[in-house]
Each structure stands twice: as C-alpha cells, then as structure tokens.
Amino acid sequence: MFDEISDKFEQAWKKLRGQDKITTSNIQGAIREVRRALLEADANLQVVKDFSDRLTQKAQGADVIAGVRPDQQFIKIVYDELVQVMGSENAPLAEAETAPTVILMAGLQGTGKTTASAKLALHLRKLNRTTLLVATDIYRPAAIDQLITLGNQIDVPVFQLGTDANPVEIARQGVAHAKAEGINTVIVDTAGRLQIDETMMAELVQIKQAIAPHEVLLVVDAMTGQEAANLTRTFHDQIGITGAILTKLDGDTRGGAALSVREISGQPIKFVGVGEKVEALQPFYPERMASRILGMGDVLTLVEKAQEEINIADAEKLQEKILSAKFDFDDFLKNTRMMKSMGSFGGLLKMLPGMKINDAQIKEAENQLKRCEAMISSMTKQERQDPDLLAKSPSRKQRIAKGSGYQLQDVTKLVSDFQRMRTMMQQMGKGKMPGMPGGGFPDMMGGNMPPGSQPSYGKKKKKKKGFGEL
C-alpha cells in the first residue's frame, strides 16, 4: 500500500549515502526528496511544510552516533517524526464506566461507513464486549438491509425502526434498548451524503445531543488523499470527533491521508480497514505504520494475525512433521489455507522486513499457489500423504495432470520442488540451511524467490542499501 512513497524515500537516503556526517548543505537535498515523496503521496500541503521544517531543525541539530552512518541517522529522525505526526501511540477505544459505551459513526457516503461499523462490532465481539448495531441511515437505498446482513454475518444484533422513522429517535431508542438488555457497546451507523451539507451536519449534531456518545469516529476513505484533511477539519469543527477510522488502506492509496488526519484534527486514527472482509480491521499503531511507510515491514502485526488465526496445537503438529520429514501434501494445503485466512499473500509478504517484491512477482506467486492447489486436489488421499509414490510413478503424475488441467511437466516440477522443500525444512530443523539450486528457495511459489527477497545464509554479510539498522 505504501510502495510508491517507500521508493521515493529511498531517493532521500541516497543523498546522504557515502557522506561522513550530516551538514547543512548535504541535508537539504535529502529533505527536498522527503518533501517530494510526501507531496506525491497526496499528503496535505501544510502538513508537509510543517513536517519538513521540523525535520530540518532536528536533522541539523543531530549528533551522529559513533558507528552509525549519516543516512541511517537521518532515517531514524524521519521515522521518529512520522510516528509523532501520526499520533505517537495507539489510542484505544473509550469504555464507559456504566454500560453501554456509545459510539457514533460519521462520514461521507461511499467511505465504507456501514461496513466499518460491522467490522468494529466484530472487533469488539472478539474482545468479549457485547455489541448492538443501530441503523439510522434511512436515506440510502438498502442501507438498513446492508447493516442487517452484516450483523447476521458476524452474529451481532441490529436495531432498526424502518425508513419512515426519525433518525434521532432511532438512535435514542437504540441506546435505550441496549441499556435495557445489558449490552456493553452501541455502534450507531449514521447517514452520509455525497458531499458535506448543512442538513447532514444538523442531523449529526441532533443525534449526538440525543445519545451523548463516548466516541465520535469519522470514517475516512484513505484514497481521498489531501481531501481527507479538509474533510476531517470540517467534521471536527462542526460535530467534534474523537478519532478516525481510515478505510481502504489496502487499495491503490499513496498514504497521504494517514499522515494528514491526525495532524489536522489533533484526534487520533484508531483503526484502519485493510480489506473488504469484516475481519479486515486493525487497531492503528503509528510506529508500525511508520515502519511500513519506510519499507521496513510490520512484524508485530504479522505475529498478531498469526496468533489470531493459527491453532497452536496444529502448528506444533506441523513442526513435528517438518522436523521428521513427514510433511506431506495435505500439510502443505492446510498450511496454505491457514496463511490465506491471515490475509492476502502480497499483504503478508510486505510485512516482512527487507522483502523487496513487486506486484507482478506477488501475482505470479499467487497464481502458482492456485496451480499447486489444483494439482494436489487431483491426487488420491494416499498420494497426498505419501509424496514419494508420485516420484516413482509417471502414470500417476499423468493422471493428476489430466485431472487438474495442467501438463505432465507441471506435476513433475511440483513433486520435485516439494521434495526439495521437505529436505530443506528438515535440515533447517537441525540448524542447517542448504544452498538451493538457483540461489533461492524451491520454486513452489512461482520461481526461485527474487533476489533481495530472501535471507542470505552462509554468505559474507554485504553492506546494506537502504534503511540499515534503526
């Protein structure tokens, strides 16, 4: 999601690479590249100006630490400033001392507000907080039906009085219903408009006065870029927001909205939407987002995804099979599907530090995984559990090729790659890392992993380009 801005930042580091210290003259070129990167990311102009000024001041006054190159020192300064701009630390949702906690959702039409309401309800349900969704959008066709459908999908009740009731009354009765039922949190989904207008704001103000929410969350489409800052300012001035949810951060966004919202409103981004599924909502951590913007991955979020989706007992069994060379095609399928449950393949790869892989390579890897699944699905139960059967039988491979719609050489390659991968996994378990043909991992993922996207074992450590060690 931040590929473009990460590449532009790389140009800034190059301005300082090879320098022995940070000076007034050599820092200007680097800051100019940072400013250009932020502007091309569609960050708010005033935010970029203030960011650049603070960066200049801090960089010129920085003492270069012994053993740290000037470009590395500058990266650390940029990282710290990015974290500061986006809010320093995660801001959790408010929780009322006396239930229910009331959350009012606001935003323009088309930002994903209704879906964000359902995503938030599911997130709270996972935290063992009972939740009620309240449908007050009586204007958009099928808006209430959409919320009911989403509520059924995540097993969260929806309160609604139809399209003829007054939105303020719906909200008031919804909160009263939650209080009577002992529900912990109420999420009120309000109507949006194609643009900000007086009628919309007046209705929001009336709903806010009627239910006295503990949180007023503005749902912002990350793809709106600079306009996100203006939108945030208007809503904050007129209704007073307490935080924001940034949606569509997985799309073709350049990242500017993530940098602008907090700086303009003074209110934190609390969650980010990273996909269309109702599970695709993550708490916002400024330090993790800064790391992703700078292309340094986000291992903590990756670990949290794994902890949420992976069964520990299954993982331990899988580890035992790997170490004893009993890893079979059934295990490979189970592992692949488990990985899919954590999100898109490309999204997971980009959370790994130093993983330089482009969209074309990701697409090829995803296509190769589909081919693998099709061929494995054409195998018998015995063949999946004993891959050596296929290595010895051309007729079995021919049957699988016909059944899956691929060529014999595709099946032969799958079996060969699988055997090499199984051998490599076993040796890794013994503390060894064999060199693979072609200088990479076995190519079950669509060719040997691209140069720079795999770790280097048993080789002399080369001087790093890019971000160095923070």
Image: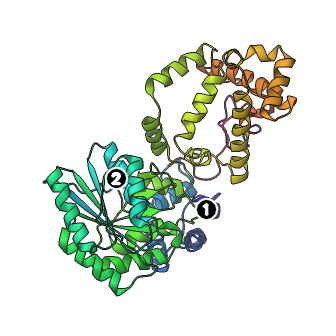
Nearer to the camera, 212 or 320 = 212
Residue named by callout 2: 121
Give the answer, above or below, for where 131 lies relative to 175.
Answer: above
Q: Amino acid at mark 2?
A: Ala
Residue named by callout 1: 16
Describe the element under mark 2 as helix, strand or loop. Answer: helix
Give the answer, above or below, for where 352 lies relative to 47.
Answer: above
Nearer to the camera, 97 or 33 = 97
Please report the residue visible at 35 percent of the width from the left and 73 percent of the height from the top: 265
Magenta stretch, residue numbers: 446-458
Q: Amino acid at mark 1?
A: Leu
Residue 452 in magenta stretch: yes
Measure the C-alpha gap from mark 2 to mark 1.
Answer: 47 Å
Going from N to C along the chain, the mark reached first, 2 or 1, is 1
Residue 460 point in image, percent of width and height:
69, 34
Position of residue 167 in the picture relative to residue 274 (left or right): left
Residue 277 point in image, percent of width and height:
49, 51
Residue 96 in magenta stretch: no
**Magenta stretch mostly in which secondary structure?**
loop
Residue 99 point in image, percent of width and height:
16, 53
**Residue 186 in view:** yes
